[in-house]
Image: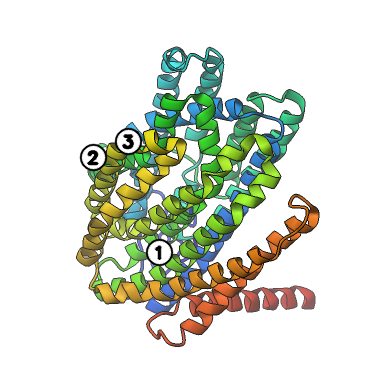
């Protein structure tokens, strides 16, 4: 439920007449979104994607700083207890997932009653999650032989209605592609959670520091959602709209169940097979290593689905837009995954401490699994925007079945490290379905898509070369400040080599324009900011 900036669909929800030229909707009115010129749509999509990426990077930075600090005060079991609570929240939530937020984004002609109906359904879902979690608290604690889980699960259950009361503004921001507002929403609430979590860890030094951080983030997210948008819920529930959204959301519900199994299944399996502390170790590694999947895939879906929805009726334009954006997606996913695999383990060893060594060893294979999952997710916004969520359902189904079949034998062979290998196996087997969906939704050929990956692959080679050369230089004191600075410099040099190599390579691949588009966006935003500063100074 995150959002970018292309056209305003809901400027106000207080009863004004619809302004068709801007695609503005009002309660009781319609939102007949006006098609945006191709170049404008492409530029605004990339600009919005840049905002969303900045939001996710900042939010991820806040989360990782919080986890790194709290890991110094809390042990693996504390994180494992919290992760079990989150696991069962996801478990209950996935079976009550409506997909209504995606239906709101995808619907060409949106009315205010659509939004009100969806809001009440989402609130009801959060209440169901809370009641179910409270009812299952004791059985879950008995399953893990951890009585301390009961109050933790009850506290998490209490927080679910708070999240259910969040305004519909995050969905509307995403539909309107107003990601600069999503940036304020995510980063503002994340910063509050960071401060509260650190203070609570210093005082309590137990799992309740994590609970309080989550509570602070939830409450601040709720308040900001109403401060940043004029939407206010009304008692309007339309049964016909509910049934229409349910039909669209049915495929997404099935896909979300399998997606849950893909994301949380390995950790849940590991917790049963190896214990609660093992879940803490596994999830700690996943927090850092699976950034490409957890965050970049969210950027890809949120930034592209509204844009694709705008042109879903024009297959040629849609194909060109897909190729233009998938090149940038491939570039970011490949670059970040390679840097995580090669550069992150040493930094985590130094920052988290000796107690997390086993967790750090899982980072490379988890990063590869996360990067591969993120690459597959590039088809997700396309399938949803064109009204074909069944392709994502089939893709997730195949991935899940293959992964589940591999979990036990690989865990027996490689312990915790075998879990992400099972994910990779499922990912590889589902690639043909991903490609079939692309072919059905667009006119792209295999050559068209492959070309978009070539510059990123060359840039990945440049990162490997820089790291190989950098590893030749040895520092006498491995844990010294100089060693840390050298390693950070090596990561920076690798990132520079990656983008510089792609910048050179794209001159020989005329069909690839992702880096040029990205430069253009930042250049135009810089010029706009400069003009605004000059105007302010003149006034």
Label 1 belongs to which residue? 23
Q: Which element is circle 2 on?
A: helix
Label 2 belongs to which residue? 243
Residue shown at 60%/53% (left/top)? 344
Q: Are marks 1 and 2 in contact (CB under 8 Å)?
A: no
Q: Position of residue 360 (x, y in %)?
A: 58, 43
Q: Which element is circle 3 on?
A: helix
Up-down relation of residue 480 to residue 22 (above or below): above
Up-down relation of residue 4 to residue 241 (above or below): below
Q: Earlier in the sequence, mark 1 or mark 2?
A: 1
For marks 3 and 2, give the one nearer the viewer.
3
Q: What quarter of the picture does the C terminus occupy?
A: bottom right
Q: Which element is circle 1 on?
A: loop
How crowded is the residue under tag 3: few (<14 C-alpha within 10 Å), some, or many (20+)?
some
Q: Position of residue 290 (x, y in %)?
A: 49, 49
Query: Which image quadrant is residue 80 in?
Result: top right
For marks 3 and 1, give the one nearer the viewer.
3
Q: Nearer the viewer, residue 487 or 299?
A: 487
Q: Position of residue 172 (x, y in %)?
A: 45, 52
Between the C-alphas of marks 3 and 2, the distance is 43 Å
How crowded is the residue under tag 1: few (<14 C-alpha within 10 Å), some, or many (20+)?
many
**Viewer can see residue 245:** no
For marks 1 and 2, give the one nearer the viewer.
2
Label 3 belongs to which residue? 409
């Amino acid at each position: 439920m995150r959002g970018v900036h292309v056209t305003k669909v809901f400027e106000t929800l207080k009863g004004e007449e619809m302004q068709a030229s801007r695609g503005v909707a009002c309660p009781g009115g319609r939102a007949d979104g006006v098609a945006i010129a191709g170049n404008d749509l492409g530029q605004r999509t990339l600009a919005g994607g840049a905002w969303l990426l900045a939001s996710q990077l900042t939010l991820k930075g806040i989360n990782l700083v919080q986890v790194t600090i709290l890991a110094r005060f809390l042990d693996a079991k504390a994180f494992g207890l919290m992760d079990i609570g989150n696991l069962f929240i996801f478990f209950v939530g996935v079976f009550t997932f409506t997909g209504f937020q995606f239906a709101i984004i995808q619907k060409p002609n949106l009315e205010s009653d659509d939004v009100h109906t969806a809001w009440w359904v989402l609130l009801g879902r959060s209440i169901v999650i809370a009641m179910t979690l409270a009812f299952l608290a004791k059985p879950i604690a008995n399953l893990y032989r951890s009585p301390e889980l009961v109050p933790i699960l009850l506290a998490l259950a209490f927080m679910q209605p708070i999240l259910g009361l969040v305004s519909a503004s995050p969905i509307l921001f995403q539909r309107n592609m107003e990601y600069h507002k999503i940036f304020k929403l995510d980063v503002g609430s994340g910063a509050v959670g960071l401060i509260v979590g650190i203070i609570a860890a210093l005082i309590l030094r137990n799992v309740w520091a994590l609970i309080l951080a989550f509570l602070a983030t939830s409450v601040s997210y709720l308040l900001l959602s109403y401060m940043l948008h004029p939407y206010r819920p009304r008692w309007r529930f339309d049964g016909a709209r509910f049934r229409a959204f349910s039909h669209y959301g049915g495929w997404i519900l099935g896909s979300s169940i399998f997606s849950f199994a893909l994301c949380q299944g390995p950790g849940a399996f590991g917790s049963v097979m190896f214990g609660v502390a093992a879940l803490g170790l596994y999830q700690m590694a996943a927090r850092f290593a699976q950034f490409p999947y957890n965050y970049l895939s969210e950027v890809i879906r949120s930034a592209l689905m509204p844009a694709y929805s705008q042109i879903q009726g024009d297959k040629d334009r849609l194909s060109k837009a897909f190729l233009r954006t998938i090149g940038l997606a491939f570039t970011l996913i490949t670059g970040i995954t390679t840097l995580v695999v090669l550069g992150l383990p040493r930094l985590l060893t130094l920052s988290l401490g000796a107690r997390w060594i086993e967790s750090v060893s899982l980072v490379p294979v988890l990063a590869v699994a996360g990067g591969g999952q993120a690459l597959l997710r590039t088809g997700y916004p396309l399938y949803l925007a064109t009204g074909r969520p069944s392709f994502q359902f089939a893709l997730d189904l195949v991935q899940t079945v293959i992964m589940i079949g591999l979990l036990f034998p690989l865990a027996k062979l490689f312990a915790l490290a075998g879990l992400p290998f099972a994910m990779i196996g499922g990912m590889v087997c589902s690639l043909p379905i991903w490609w079939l969906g692309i072919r059905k939704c667009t006119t792209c050929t295999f050559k068209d898509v492959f070309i978009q990956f070539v510059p990123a692959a060359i840039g990945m080679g440049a990162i490997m070369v820089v790291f190989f050369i950098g590893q030749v230089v040895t520092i006498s004191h491995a844990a010294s400040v100089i060693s840390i600075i050298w390693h950070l410099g090596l990561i920076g040099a690798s990132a520079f080599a990656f983008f510089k190599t792609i910048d050179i390579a794209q001159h020989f691949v005329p069909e690839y324009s992702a880096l040029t588009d990205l430069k253009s966006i930042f250049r135009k935003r810089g010029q706009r900011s400069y003009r605004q500063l000059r105007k302010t100074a003149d006034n």
